[in-house]
Amino acid sequence: MISRTIIVEAEHGLHARPVSELVKLAKTLKATVLLSSSGKQVKAASMLGILSLGLKKGTELVISAEGDDEQEAVDAIASFISSIKE
Amino acid sequence: MKRRIQQFGRSLSAMVMPNIGAFIAWGFITALFIPAGWWPDENLAKIGEPMMTYLLPLLIAFTAGYNVYEHRGGVIGVIATTGVIAGSSIPMFIGAMILGPFSAYCIKAFDKTIGQRTKAGFEMLVNNFSIGIIGMLLAIAGFLVVGGMVEGITAVLKNGVFLLLSHHLLPLVSIIVEPAKVLFLNNAINHGICTPLGIQDVGEYGKSIIFMIESNPGAGLGLLLATWLFGQGIAKQSAPGAAIIHFLGGIHEIYFPYVLAQPLLLLATICGSASALMFYSLADAGLVAPASPGSIIAYLAMAPKGQTFVACIGVLIACAVSFVIASLILRFSHATQEEEIVEPEPVQGKIQKIVFACDAGMGSSALGATRFKSRLIKEDIHDIVCTNSAIDKVPANASVVVCQQALAQRAAELLPDKTIVVIDNFLSDARLDALLKSIKSQQEPFPAGEKTGDIMSCPPPATLPLIQKENIILGLKAEDKDNAIRRAGRLLEKGEYVSPGYAETMIEREKLTTTYMGMGLAIPHGTSEAKEKVRASGIVVLQYPEGVIFEGEEKAHLVIGIAGVGNEHIDILSKISSALDDEELLQKLFVTNNTDDIYNILK
């Protein structure tokens, strides 16, 4: 199990569009990726789940992955979220 | 460039014109009570001097400073100007017009740099001492510098006049004298040159044309008449009164603020006086003594026997020429301003929220908002929100932003996508009138159409709840995706959460990336550009037991249309997601006949 913490920097937070792309990305990964924030944990492959975290700019997010290529998975998810600027 | 000049002109006008009442008060006191006045009273006449020396320049300084940085700017403006007044022997209007804004900018810059670093609790101390100390320094600097400057400029002007007179270029003297008058530099010229030379002439010829240079009331009258007919706002309304004080009372100073507010008008007075002087030269006219005060009565009284008529003609010439030129100038600037008024009218969508913005968000903007709101109520318009805020905190759902021209640049930078109305005066301005007009025309009912239907008939309630039972529609027959989205959009428009057109942006948004979330749930919403159309946050729910095809094979059984004000969008998504993150629950909601089931989950 690998974990990594990042801060959401997207100006308008993680709204539906980036989240749906994130979900697409998560589905391509072998490892099971989990996202947790403010005490709530959800699957990265669930759009409903991610949206329910209400990730706004400045929110702290913990990305964890378990399974094959878990390191690459965490890195991929982390860099995708960090690349969201709008 | 033209804009800058216009803005500069407007700021001059904005510092002088609001105080015209004080000028008129002074004008009356002087016209009435000075020894040569209509009702001489040595005692009451004493009021005049402190007014001219202190009251009027300080009022201008305060207004000028206020326009830049509200009360704080005004306070430091008067502090600095007092220094200049103390150091000068002539009324310091120009000093006020320069130092007022300058000191306000100084304290503004100071506040910006120091503001962030002030320790909590020390703000009040720093605030007051910064004005105190910087104000003091500016006052001292002004005091020391101004005296020398005034002397220097006066010397130059005196030499200029002397040169022109000795070369027999009398009419050209107006080019120096008229501006000098307006800056109160004429006394030195009079005492230093005109009077001695004039007296010499009288000794030789019994009269002197030199006494007619400064006291001809015709030019000022022409200017004021033009302002009365073609001016705007305060200037226009106060001009007749000023004309009486000027022409009949002989207090020329009353027209100076009109010139200071629009310096281009100097052309009018210069040409008017010069024309009269040319005529007088040709007619070999003159006065036997200086006409003081410069009223028409005193002026004609000083004409030599039999030459009263000639003197009169000169006054008429000055008046006519000055009037024509001033009218042209005023109409020209009026016309260019009118063009601008027309611009802000096409506001996209219905005007729902007008935000008056100023620097701090407290003083002038609150005044403007309250005032405009009462104007709206007078016109029986109750559903438009009229509020105020600091320029950098304007809410995202403002339809129109109103600010003073000093902030126009900043407003355009901070709010590139908002319609901005730029005005001089928060209380009454032609552009606010135009805004009111366009609001009134928007109140007319829209033609009933497929999209808007009966949206415009009732005003929206003060706060809209996020979800309402009437916005949950059950048992819809399957239709295609775009229709479903449009249906949701229309429901949002009907509920007045958004303005018309939002539905189409929802379809656009769907084309960017699907809003289908999986598990039979779709959350269509508008594009980020459509945020302006969002009036209040809200959601509507469409239930399709048979499902609407969204992505490939995926069917949405609940289509939830969303409108989010600003960043509330994310919160709404979060709320919906949390509430519905349960597959069993969703299956139930997809087919239920009971609106309450859905309502209770989402409320």
Image (spheres, rainbow, N blue to C red):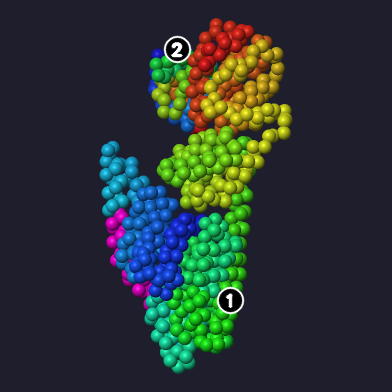
Amino acid found under the numbered disc labelled 1: Leu
Q: Position of residue B255 (x, y in %)?
A: 49, 66
Judged by depth in the image, the label closer to the viewer, 2 or 1, is 1
Would you say residue B260 is visible in this rendering?
no
Circle 2 sits in a helix, a strand or a loop, which is it?
A: loop
Q: In this rendering, is residue A43 above or below B156?
A: above
Task: Please name the predominant secondary structure of the magenta segment in the image.
Answer: helix
User: Quadrant of residue B196 in the image?
Assistant: bottom left
Marks 2, 1 in one chain: no
Residue B148 place in picture, x, y as percent? 33, 71
- Around disc 1, counting alpha carbons within 10 Å, would you say few (fewer than 14), some (14 to 19), or many (20 or more)? many
Query: What residue is at 34 percent from the left and 67 percent from the top?
Result: B43
Residue B562 sits inside the magenta stretch: no
User: In the image shown, does B159 or B586 lie closer to the viewer?
Assistant: B159
Tell me the number on the disc at residue B316.
1
Residue at image position (54%, 73%) is B219
The chain letter for the residue carrying disc 2 is A
Between the C-alphas of marks 2 and 1, the distance is 100 Å
Q: Nearer the viewer, residue B276 or B111?
A: B276
Residue drawn at x 65%, y 18% as measured from the top left: B550
Disc number for residue A67: 2
* Type of the residue with mark 2: Gly
Is residue B141 highlighted in magenta?
yes
Secondary structure beneath dot 1 equals helix
Does A80 appear above or below B162? above
Farthest residue, direction bottom: B204
Magenta-colored span: B134-156
Looking at the image, can residue B593 be seen? yes
Q: Position of residue B258 (x, y in %)?
A: 50, 63
At x 66%, y 22%, the residue is B487
Quadrant of the image for the N terminus of chain B? bottom right
Q: Which mark is residue B65?
A: none
